[in-house]
C-alpha cells in the first residue's frame, strides 16, 4: 500500500524532474537563441552597404548545422543555405511583384499549390525558388517549418534574375545542380534588364500568340529560358501579347512580367 510519505516523495521527484527538464529545455532555447544572435550579427555586418544582387557569406564547417537556427535565419532574411555558405538575395519590389503575379496566375489556372519564396530542401541544401508549383501541396509541418520537416522541391521551379553576370550565374548554377540531383522538375528562368529604362508600352492589339523559340540566349533582356525533357535550353525573347506553355500545361503570359517593367 502506498503511504502518504511515499506519495509525497514521488510527487517531489516528479516536480524536481519536471524542473530539470524545463531547465534543459530553457538552456537549449538560450543556446539556440545565442547562436542565432551571433549569426544574425555576422549577416548584418556583411550586409552593410549592400543593396542589390546576391551576397555570399561563408561560415565555418558545421556552424549552420542547427536546423532550428536555420529556420530562424530564413524567417529573418531572404536566404538560401548551400553547404557552409549562406546566400542573401536582395530582391527589390520589381522582382517581388513579378513573383506574386506569377504565383497568382498559376493558382488561377490549376488547383495545384503555388507559392513564392517557399523554402525546400535538396540533398541537405536549403533553397528558395522565386516561384514554385507543387502538384501535391507540402504538409502543414513542411509549410510551417520547411527546414526541420524537409519540404520537398516544387514540380515547377521559376527563377527570376537580372541580366548581369553574378545574378544570372547564380540562378543557372543553382538550376544546373538541381537538374543533376533531382528528377521530374520543370525549370524556367526569367531574365530582366538590369538597366533603369522602362520597357516599351503595350500595343493596342489584343491577339495572344505563342512566343517563337530560339537556340541561343537573346542579346538583350527581358527573356525566358525553358528546359525541355532532355534538359536542352529553349530561349524566348519577351514581348507583349506572347506566352509559352510548359510541359505540365501551365502557361506563362509575358504580359505578367512586362507590366512590372513599365514606368
Image (tube, helix red, strand yellow):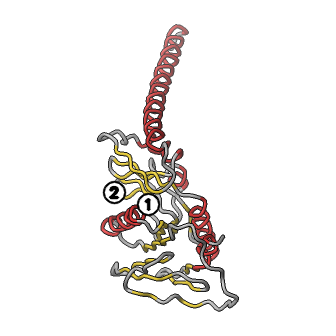
Q: Is residue 23 above or below residue 179?
A: above
Q: Quick one: 182 or 57, which is closer to the camera? A: 57
| Mark 2 closeness class: few <14, some 14–19, many ≥20 residues within 10 Å | few
Q: Secondary structure at mark 1?
A: loop
Q: Residue at x 50, y 22 (%)?
A: 18
Apparent side of residue 214 relative to residue 181 in the rendered image (left or right): right
Q: Is residue 143 above or below residue 136?
A: above
Of pointers 1 and 2, the one earlier in the residue sequence: 2
Q: Is residue 64 above or below residue 89?
A: above
| Residue matched to label 1 | 152
| Mark 1 closeness class: few <14, some 14–19, many ≥20 residues within 10 Å | some
Q: Residue at x 53, y 57 (%)?
A: 91
Q: Position of residue 196 (x, y in %)?
A: 56, 66
| Residue matched to label 2 | 123
Q: Is residue 196 above or below residue 85?
A: below
Q: Secondary structure at mark 2?
A: loop
Q: Position of residue 240 (x, y in %)?
A: 60, 83
Amino acid at each position: 500500500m502506498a503511504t502518504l510519505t511515499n506519495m509525497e516523495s514521488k510527487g517531489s521527484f516528479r516536480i524536481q524532474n519536471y524542473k530539470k527538464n524545463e531547465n534543459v529545455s530553457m538552456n537549449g532555447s538560450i543556446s539556440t537563441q545565442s547562436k542565432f544572435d551571433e549569426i544574425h550579427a555576422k549577416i548584418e555586418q556583411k550586409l552593410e552597404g549592400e543593396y542589390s544582387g546576391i551576397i555570399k557569406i561563408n561560415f565555418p564547417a558545421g556552424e549552420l548545422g542547427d536546423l532550428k537556427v536555420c529556420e530562424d535565419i530564413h524567417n529573418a532574411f531572404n536566404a538560401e543555405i548551400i553547404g557552409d555558405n549562406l546566400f542573401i538575395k536582395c530582391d527589390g519590389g520589381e522582382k517581388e511583384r513579378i513573383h506574386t503575379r506569377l504565383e497568382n496566375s498559376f493558382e488561377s489556372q490549376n488547383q495545384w499549390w503555388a507559392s513564392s519564396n517557399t523554402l525546400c530542401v535538396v540533398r541537405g541544401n536549403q533553397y528558395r525558388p522565386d516561384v514554385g508549383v507543387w502538384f501535391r501541396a507540402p504538409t502543414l509541418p513542411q509549410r510551417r517549418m520547411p527546414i526541420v520537416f524537409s519540404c520537398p522541391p516544387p514540380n515547377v521551379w521559376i527563377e527570376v534574375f537580372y541580366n548581369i553576370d553574378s545574378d544570372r550565374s547564380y540562378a543557372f548554377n543553382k538550376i544546373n545542380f538541381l537538374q543533376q540531383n533531382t528528377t521530374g522538375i520543370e525549370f524556367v528562368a526569367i531574365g530582366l534588364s538590369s538597366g533603369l529604362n522602362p520597357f516599351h508600352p503595350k500595343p493596342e492589339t489584343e491577339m495572344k500568340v505563342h512566343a517563337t523559340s530560339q537556340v541561343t540566349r537573346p542579346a538583350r533582356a527581358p527573356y525566358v529560358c525553358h528546359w525541355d525533357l532532355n534538359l536542352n535550353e529553349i530561349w524566348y525573347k519577351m514581348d507583349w501579347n506572347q506566352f509559352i506553355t510548359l510541359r505540365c500545361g501551365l502557361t506563362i503570359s509575358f504580359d505578367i512580367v512586362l507590366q512590372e517593367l513599365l514606368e
